[in-house]
Every structure is written in C-alpha cells, then in structure tokens.
Image (cartoon, helix red, strand yellow):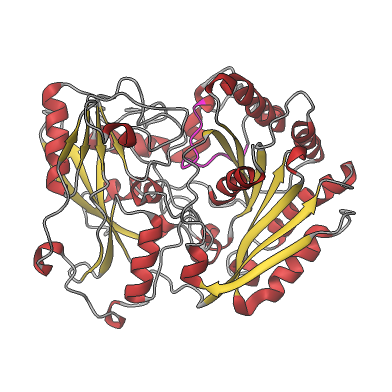
Amino acid sequence: MSQHSRRDLFRVGAVAGAMASATALQPTPALAADAGCAPPLGPVRVRPDDPRYEDLVRRGNGRFVGTPDEVRVVGSTDQVVEAVRDAIRSGRRMAVRAGGHGFEGFVDDADVRMVIDLSGLTGIYFDPERSAFVVEAGATLGEVYRRLYLGWGVTIPGGSCPGVGAGGHVAGGGYGRLSRLHGLAADHLYAVEVVVADRKGDVRAVVATRESSDPRRELWWAHTGGGGGNFGVVTRYWLRSLPHPPARVVNFTVTWPWEGMDEHGFHQLAANFGAWCERHSTPGAPQASLYSELVLTRRPSGAHLLTGQVPADAVHLLDEHVAALGKGVGVTPSRSQETLPWLAATLANEADDGKRWRLKVKSAFHRESLTRRQLAAALHHLTRTDYDAPAGSLSLNTYGGAINSMSAGATATAHRDSTMLLFYLTGWTDPAEDARHLSWIREFYHDMYTDTGGVPAAGTYINYPDVDLADPAWNRSNRPWHALYYGDHYSRLQAVKARWDPQDLFRHALSIRRA
C-alpha cells in the first residue's frame, strides 16, 4: 500500500468523524415548481443488464455489493411514493441509499430486491412558509455546505466528509467540526418529510414537525438520532436557527513520530488528549470552537496524526492544545497549518470518500480519559507483530460542548454527557484478507472494553453502525445492541416504528424492532 493511499485511509478515519431569525433572511424563489425549474431527475429504472447498474450497486463499503433486481433513481417525493408502492405490490424487499457511506451492508443485503437511490433528490432552498431551510435527502454534505453558505452565509454543524448523504446523516444525529460550538445537525431539525406505508399497504408522504401540537411530532423526534432506514423514506428536512460559520479557519495537522516513542510516551499522548477533552467539553467553554481528532496509528504507518480545525482568530487555542497533548510524550511533533476561507477549508477533502476500501469500523463514547488498562490494550494492538497491515487506527475525537447542552430526552440522540467519541477503523482491498482484518479490529475493541463485556459503558454512535454489537460472541455484556445506541429511548422509538411502519417494510440488521 502506497504512502499516498495510506494517508487517504487515515483521512477517511479522521473525517468519519442559521438563520439567526427569519426576518434576517430574504426568501428566494426556492420551490422548484414555483421557480420554473426543469423537471426532476427520474424516475430511472436500472436493472442488471444496464451499464449503469454496476456503478449504482458499488456506492458503499467495498465489502458489500448488492444484487437487487432494480435500482430506482428518484428525483421527487412523488417518485419515492411510487417506488415504495411498486415494491409493496411486487412483494420485494426495499432499501434506501443517499450518499452511500453506510459502513455495514444494510442496503447491499442479499434479500434487498429494490434499492431506492435518492441521487436526484438534491434540492437545497429556503421555504418561507415554514421559515426554514430545506435540504433534500439525496444532497451530499458538501453541496449542503456550499449552497447554504453561498446563498445565506449559514451552515449545518454536520460531518467533515463532503460526500456523505444528508439523508442518513441527519437522521442519525449528524456530528462534525462545528458540533462542539453549535450542537448536532439534528438539533436544528424543525420538520421532516417521510414516505410511509400503513398496515394496508397504502403509501403516502407525511410531514412531521417539532411543534408540540403536531400529532406527528413523535415521527419528527425519531429522526433526531434514531438512525436511517427505520420508519420510511426521508425525502426532505427543514432546518432552523442555522449558525454562521467562522469567516476564516485554520486546518491543521500535527504528527508525533513512532520512532523514539516509548510505552510511556504513547500512554501520555493518548491520556493527555482525554484529559484535555474532560477539561474543555462543557457547554460554552472557549475551547469548544476547536475541533480535533487524534489518530493513533499502527506502528508501520510511521506517526500519529492530530488533525482538525479552529477559527483563524483563535489560533492560540491550537497552540495550547498541542502543548497540552505533547507534555511528557518525549518526541518532538511536526506541525503544518493552512488558513483558508471556511468553505474552502471545509471542502478541502471533497474528492476523498473512502469507497474503494473494504472497511470495518466501530465506535465508543467516553465520558473520561482512557484507563491505564485501555491505554495498554491500545498500544498492544497497534504494535502487534502478527498483524502487519498499516491501515488500522483508533481516532479520539473531541466531543461535548454544545452537544451536551441539550437534555437527553429532547431528541432521539441519547448521548449528551460524553467528552470523546472514539472511532476504530481498518481498511483493506483484497477480499481474501477479510477474516484477518476483521479479527484484528474485533479483538482490539473487545480488549478495550473487556471489563464491560466487550462493549463500551457509555454507548456507541448509530451513524457508525457495527453489527457485532448484536452478536453475543462479541457483546458479552447484559446490554443489548439497542441500549448501546439509544439508551433509554428504545421503547419510544419502538412505538414510532409500530405506528409508522407496522409492516416492518424498512428494516436491516440493526433496525428498530417493533415492540
């Protein structure tokens, strides 16, 4: 594996990480029908003998390639309604794809016979009737950032990978570089449009809002962290109170070489990061404007990476951060940084989507620094000589801040008291090596949480799904997988499932089960 491709994969691990008032905005002639725009793309029916088929079934994790009878590319809510009707009439299991960044094979399941591809649902505009910005579910985050910022000077505090689709990202909470300052993307969700089917098979599109008087409010709530593919097909989100990002930011990379770093230095670097997060993750902390990811790499990669972003007028926070992390490590880091306009900095890695890799990921929320036993486990698995692949890593991501200012029950996102989000990653290209790489990351993760049955006590992030959590061979705790993702919210999500998807048409390996 080349140095360039290794760096790309590490970056995949690193990124796998408003309106102030309605009167301040000048509404645009936004709705496509009113603006005299061209008809929407689709519907396009792509079957296995179509030259477009291979591309459409290879839009996700390289480990999973589906064989559906049909991929239906849609460009409007009406087209989604008709696609769902067709699937029900023909008795075909369906799945929905937005950006294609799912880490598990939920869409590419062998039982899925129709994939509803939202590539044509990419509208981004302001809706004056609801005083909210509309983002259609097939729009990628990069295009969301571009259109919202160039049109209105605002953004959503979403993820740092521009190729991710908004559809699943917002429904799972949506975490990114600005979240410590402005909360999760779902914290700004005012309404959602979902195509649903009742017990008789009747299909319709409904809009659910956060208004307390809305009889569909629970369906809105379920899309603020309940995850994608559970209740119907999301076609549009309405978002309010979107923040203005900094005018200029500093993108930075700091590297600590493995060469010369002993056991104490490794432990110190990781422990320092955790301690910094504990000190500076309260809502309103000045350091909330700094976002960073410490990527602890396999020894063959050569160095550990700290990447992130900070407002250009707050570079002193980066200076203090790097000094705090390097204390007692024993090796001298190298640092590079670039000051850019916010949009240019945010779209800097737009071409890097990681889809050519076979990937396995895991996640964990942490309220405190890694324990001494966890530090030792991490060092062991990152330096094992019986596993020679350089691409495995563990990323420690800053969390908390404004995320933790919202009560746990206000949205479906249960984890509102963590200071770090950990992201475990390995990637490879040869299918013959699947078992070796899967064994490494599974053993690594289990050893990190052996005291709690092989799973983290503080829970996991639904946008980084991991089917191993539902496998008793790897989850030996007394906590089911859904408690790790949803905490005490699962029974409430089950009630939403029972009302809006009574036939369990929208399901996958980690979908909400009916009560």
Q: Quadrant of residue 313?
A: bottom right
Q: Extreme top residue here?
A: 473
Which residue does the image show at 51% across and 57% down from the upper left? Answer: 349
Q: Is residue 396 left or right of residue 513?
A: right
Question: Where's the N terminus, which quadrant?
Answer: top right
Number of numbered discs present?
0
Taking the image as drawn, is residue 197 in sight?
no
Residue 464 painted magenta = yes
Residue stretch in magenta: 457-467
**Magenta stretch: dominant SS?**
loop
Q: Is residue 218 above or below residue 179?
A: above
Taking the image as drawn, is residue 328 in sight?
yes
Q: Is residue 125 left or right of residue 170?
A: left
Q: Position of residue 87 (x, y in %)?
A: 16, 28
Q: Is residue 268 left or right of residue 62?
A: right
Q: Position of residue 110 (x, y in %)?
A: 34, 20
Which residue does the image show at 43% across and 27% down from the upper left? Answer: 64
Which residue does the image show at 38% across and 66% down from the upper left? Answer: 146
Q: Is residue 212 above or below residue 289?
A: above
Residue 374 painted magenta = no
Question: Where's the C terminus, which quadrant?
Answer: top left
Q: Is residue 382 above or below residue 387?
A: below
Which residue does the image show at 69% across and 36% down from the upper left? Answer: 390
Which residue is nearer to you in this view: 207 or 354?
Answer: 354
Q: Position of residue 497 (x, y in %)?
A: 29, 35
